[in-house]
Image (tube, rainbow, N blue to C red):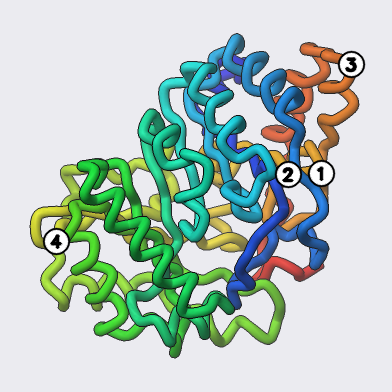
Amino acid sequence: MTQTIENVLGRFPLRVSITDNCNLSCVFCSNEGLGADRNQVSIQPEDFRYLVTTLRNHGLNHISLSGGDPTAHPAAREMVEIANESEIPQRFYHTNGILLGRDGLADALEQFTKIGVSLHTTDSARYSQITGGRPAHYDKVMAGLKSLGEKGLGQKVEVKHVTVKGMNDDPESLRGTLDLCAQYGFKFKFLNFEAIHAGQVGLVQDAEVIRQRVRDLGAVHLPEQGEVFRGQDSYLPIQWFGYKGTKGVVIDVGCGRTEVCRSCHDSNEIYVTPKLSIKPCKMSSHEIPLKEAIDRRDEGALVGSIMESRAFLRKQPGLGKTYWGQR
């Protein structure tokens, strides 16, 4: 089937990293493969509005705001309000949760479909080890999660736990996240760590090990939830589980593997960097600039860049790589 911009935008999420500002330094953070530079760039609200409005007019169905950390954007609430005003049906927010209490942000996010909070552990000391955050940061995240739960937003909240071998992949660490989610009705999301450089390959835990440990803790596999990933069925990185009245997933991203790279163009999101370029593949340094098209308000060029990014993924640029920085 020939792809059109409408079926691409109707199927694949647009994930926009609205800032490279972040107040943590997680051991597994890749900065989306953009290098070590941080705390330099934030997308201007007027550029974001044009991007979102234009693509919504072409059928965009799902937008995600991420970073850095999107709460650290100088106009964090305005960016959320722009997404709300677009009336894109699915609106996701990905944050470490530390600054959720700023400027009425949590209230604006009540209109979002999902709020993903990266926690990775319910132990304060391990939190500091994994994220570089202080105990005060951990306390703010936990207080924010409690507030979201008590507001009745549990089903909109997804607690993320990236499993790093020897740090937070043991049964007790997994149990902590599961029990927190069960307490407030949050969804859980366990992801396998992807190595950024060669020295981290030994920290990658096999997703099947995590799946088995989750089962051993009493989680029940829920295949009836549907495990086709973004409409394709040749690569299935996702399995659903139920646990004490709530549910969640274990995801095996698997970049670099043959079956993953073969299916990526048919499952991967459209990722826009803080410098307003599309970075189609995590494992590749290739970027497709959008800034000039947005400055000119050139709708045709913007749409063409989206389609170019899907064609690039068909080349399987990450095939055979075992870590993000591999060239």
Separation of marks 4 and 2 at Cα, in angstroms: 35 Å
Residue that label 2 marks: 273
Separation of marks 4 and 1 at Cα, in angstroms: 40 Å
Check disc 1 and report its element: helix, strand or loop: loop
Q: What amino acid is at disc 4? A: Tyr
Mark 2 touches mark 1? (CB < 8 Å): yes
Q: Is 133 situated above or below 236? A: below
Mark 4 touches mark 3? (CB < 8 Å): no
Q: Is 158 situated above or below 232? A: below
**Residue at horizontal 41%, vertical 55%?**
237
Q: What amino acid is at disc 2? A: Thr
**Mark 1: few/some/many CA within 10 Å (<14, 14-19, 20+):** some
Mark positioned earlier in the residue sequence (4 or 3): 4
Between residue 316 and residue 295, name the one nearer to us. 295
Mark 4 touches mark 1? (CB < 8 Å): no
Mark 4 touches mark 2? (CB < 8 Å): no
Mark positioned earlier in the residue sequence (3 or 1): 1
Residue 77 location in percent, x, y? 56, 35
**Mark 4: few/some/many CA within 10 Å (<14, 14-19, 20+):** many
Foreground disc of the pair 3, 1? 3
On residue 296, the disc is 3
**Mark 2: few/some/many CA within 10 Å (<14, 14-19, 20+):** many
On residue 287, the disc is 1
Mark positioned earlier in the residue sequence (4 or 1): 4
